[in-house]
Amino acid sequence: MIQVRAFKVAVIASLFTPLFLHTASADPDRDFSKVDCNSTKVRGMLLETYNDIKSNSDDPTVIDLYDQTTLAGGVNKLTCFGTYEFSDGDKIKMTYKLYKNSIGQFINSFEPDTNS
C-alpha cells in the first residue's frame, strides 16, 4: 500500500547552488519561468532535495523520478508534476512546489497525488 509522503520545509539557498548557480545566499528573487522540470539537472535537484529533507527518517528514499512536467514557473515559484520511485518499490505521482513564504525564505513542498 502506498504511504502518503507529504511535507513542507524551508530550504537554505545553498541547496539550489548546483542547479541555479546565480542564486545568492540572501535568497534574491529568481525567475523560474524557463526551467524544464524534466531536465536531468532539475530531476537530480528534486531527488536530492527530497532525500535531504527525509534524511532523518526511516522512510524509503527516492531512487528515481521521471515524466516531470512543468506546471508553472515564474518569479520565486516553480511547480513540477511527475512520477517518483522509492527504494521500497512504490511509485507515486507527486507535485513539487517551490515558492517564497511571507518572510522571503524559499519553501519546498512535495505533495503526493491522492488520485494515483
Image: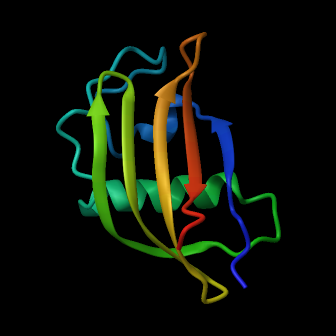
Q: Is residue 98 above or below residue 94?
A: above
The residue positioned 82% from the left and 71% from the top of the image is 58
Q: Measured from the top left, where is residue 7 in percent x and y?
A: 69, 48
Please state, as top left, top right, bottom left or bottom right, where the N terminus lies in the image.
bottom right
- 73 to the left or right of 44: left
Quarter of the image for residue 101 reads: top right
User: How many numbered marks appear?
Assistant: 0
Residue, far top: 103
Whole-percent x and y of residue 56?
80, 58
Give the percent coordinates (x, y) of residue 25: 48, 21
Q: Residue furthest bottom?
A: 89
- Using the image as rendered, state which of residue 22 and residue 83 is in the foreground: 83
Residue furthest front in the image: 115
The answer to which quarter of the image holds residue 108 is: top right
Q: Residue at x 46, y 36 (%)?
A: 98
Compared across the picture, whether 33 is left or right of 56 comes to: left
